[in-house]
Amino acid sequence: MDNSIPMQRVNTQEILDSDLCPPLEAAASLRDLSRMNRWFGGVATTRKLIERVAHSTGRKHFSLLEVAAGFGEVPNAAARHLARQGITLDITHLDRVPSHLLPGIRAVVADALALPFQDASFDLISCSLFAHHLEPDQLARFAAEALRVSRHAVLINDLIRHPLHLALVYAGFPLMRSYVSRFDGVASVRRAYVPEEMKRMLSACDRAASDRPQKIEISQHYLFRMGVIAWKSGATSSERVL
């Protein structure tokens, strides 16, 4: 994938982030997101990140906190695929907006930049399509906070900003049932980061040494998806950082 084509980042607030988003439209947009993640690489990216951690640590069971979880389709679907390999997940969902969380699941309503957990409460902290919502200083704060709460690593599954990616979003409008999804899909690509930016921001954590990533691995996946593993200090990693 060629990331050399310049495309300036434009930070436009997404409708789904707004407290004024109508509940029915929010639910429709979250269902759109669930489908897009299943069809176009979102679930596969998180699955591959967890497989990488399992291979590197030798562990087969992980407690996982999914931040900005929404309906939780990504970690739940990834867990079903991973179970076939003998890798199991104990998932807790976290979101700022209570109505985004499905009933009957283990869930917490909280701010991702101030996680209400003690140090090393979960093996993994994961998020999907959340990092691009944060400005660079916020992303560094989130990474530090997530590393504090994790035992092994922070997993970031997000978009890559690219003109071709933007064109694909426009082409995919017929697949989106909510006008919120169409507006937010364009805004998401425009405000997304590229791998070089992501690595630079995650390396800028200004917290204590234990809350800084020991290593950062960045991989590129199907249809302009970026996978990031920020390893907790002392965690096992057998491959070099990218």
Image (spheres, rainbow, N blue to C red):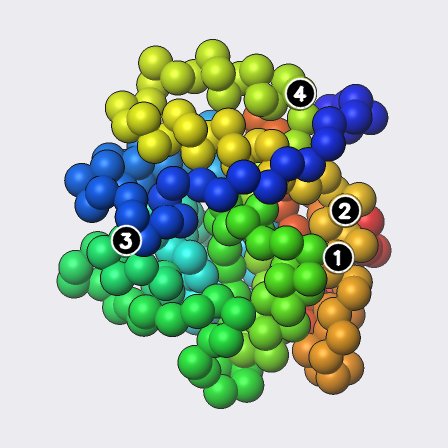
Work out how far the residue at label 3 is from the one at label 4, CA to CA, in angstroms. 30 Å
Q: Which residue is mark 4?
A: 163
Say the numbered circle drawn on residue 197: 2
SS assignment at label 4: helix
Side of 221 relative to 178 (left or right): right
Q: Which residue is mark 3?
A: 100
Whether label 1 touches label 4, CB < 8 Å: no
Work out how far the residue at label 1 is from the one at label 4, CA to CA, in angstroms. 22 Å
Work out how far the residue at label 3 is from the one at label 2, CA to CA, in angstroms. 29 Å
SS assignment at label 1: helix
Q: Residue at x 49, y 43 (%)?
A: 13
Check disc 3 and give the amino acid type. His
Q: Of marks 1 and 4, which one's residue comes earlier in the chain?
A: 4
Visible residue check, residue 77: no
Check disc 1 and give the amino acid type. Met
Q: Indicate the quadrant where residue 195 lies.
A: top right
Q: Of marks 3 and 2, which one's residue comes earlier in the chain?
A: 3
Whether label 1 touches label 2, CB < 8 Å: yes
Q: Which residue is mark 1?
A: 201
Visible residue check, residue 165: yes
Q: Residue at x 30, y 41 (%)?
A: 30
- Can you give x and y, in whole percent of width and height, for residue 137 in the image? 69, 62
Side of 50 relative to 161 (left or right): left
SS assignment at label 3: helix
